[in-house]
Image (cartoon, coloured by chain):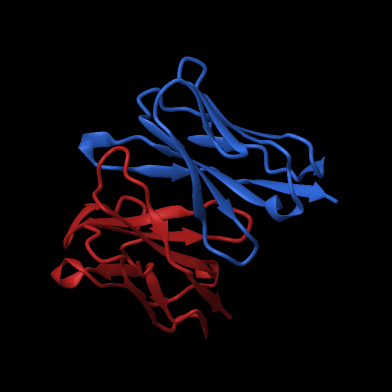
Chain colours: A blue, B red
Amino acid sequence: QKEVEQNSGPLSVPEGAIASLNCTYSDRVSQSFFWYRQYSGKSPELIMSIYSNGDKEDGRFTAQLNKASQYVSLLIRDSQPSDSATYLCAVNQAPGGYQKVTFGTGTKLQVIP
Amino acid sequence: EAGVAQSPRYKIIEKRQSVAFWCNPISGHATLYWYQQILGQGPKLLIQFQNNGVVDDSQLPKDRFSAERLKGVDSTLKIQPAKLEDSAVYLCASSLTGGMNTEAFFGQGTRLTVV
């Protein structure tokens, strides 16, 4: 089992719709969770972080964390063509007190105008 | 605030040659990471420094890869000798500390092609 699993996609949604991206992780002691956006040929850019169970909203983005079920998701409301990118889920396992971040393979999102 | 700087942006070498990449983190960031990202995959951590000490190099192929961070600031990653499967983007990232909830910021990456 991979440490961090994501559906590679592509996930296609029409402009204005809600895009739902999911991620599961294997290590129950994982402490913090990040969503990065990566445009083709560019480096990852942090868009959301979440540390406790529940929802965290930032503009059109909502991150959801359920530690009991070991999943984290990202919702993008009112999807725009500019949201088309690969979304990387990253999980921090923090062994020994230092950050150890493992990335999933990413989900490619396509927003259709 | 200046971001993470990396050079070169692109490099093409023949297999068995050596190559080095350079990274300058965000000023004041104690933690520096080198990731390898193969096309279609997520970034894989190669090595993590806290100041100038190594805290994690468990996935670094030490027979051919080496990295150093002199004076706790700039870092270099070297591959010697390179193999075809080393073709990837090498990403440097930094964070303020290496603690649990700190966020990492990435440089533009170096795209390496081994032929």
Q: Quadrant of residue B51?
A: bottom left
B17 sits left or right of B40 in the view = left
Q: Give the residue at x 26% y 53%.
A: B96
User: Compared to B73, does B102 lie above or below?
Assistant: above
B112 sits left or right of B21 in the view = right
Instruction: Identify which residue, B17 or A108, lies in the foreground.
Output: A108
Tell me residue A27's x, y (percent): 41, 27
User: Compared to A72, does B7 lie above or below?
Assistant: below
Q: Give the residue at x 24% y 49%.
A: B97
Give the total number of marks visible in the rendering: 0
Tell me residue B60's x, y (percent): 35, 58
Q: Quadrant of residue B34?
A: bottom left
In the rendered image, is residue A15 in sight? Answer: yes
State which quarter of the image contains the N terminus of chain B: bottom left
Identity of the residue furthest to the front in this view: A59
Tell me residue A79's x, y (percent): 73, 43
Q: Give the residue at x 31% y 50%.
A: B58
Identity of the residue furthest to the left in this view: B71
Tell me residue A95's x, y (percent): 27, 35
Instruction: Identify which residue, B42 or A15, lies in the foreground.
Output: A15
Identity of the residue furthest to the top in this view: A68
In the rendered image, is residue A105 in sight? Answer: no
State which quarter of the image contains the C terminus of chain B: bottom right
B7 sits left or right of B97 in the view = right
Q: Give the residue at x 31% y 65%.
A: B26
A22 sits left or right of A2 in the view = right
User: Compared to B50, does A13 lie above or below?
Assistant: above
Instruction: Identify which residue, B18 or B105, lies in the foreground.
Output: B105
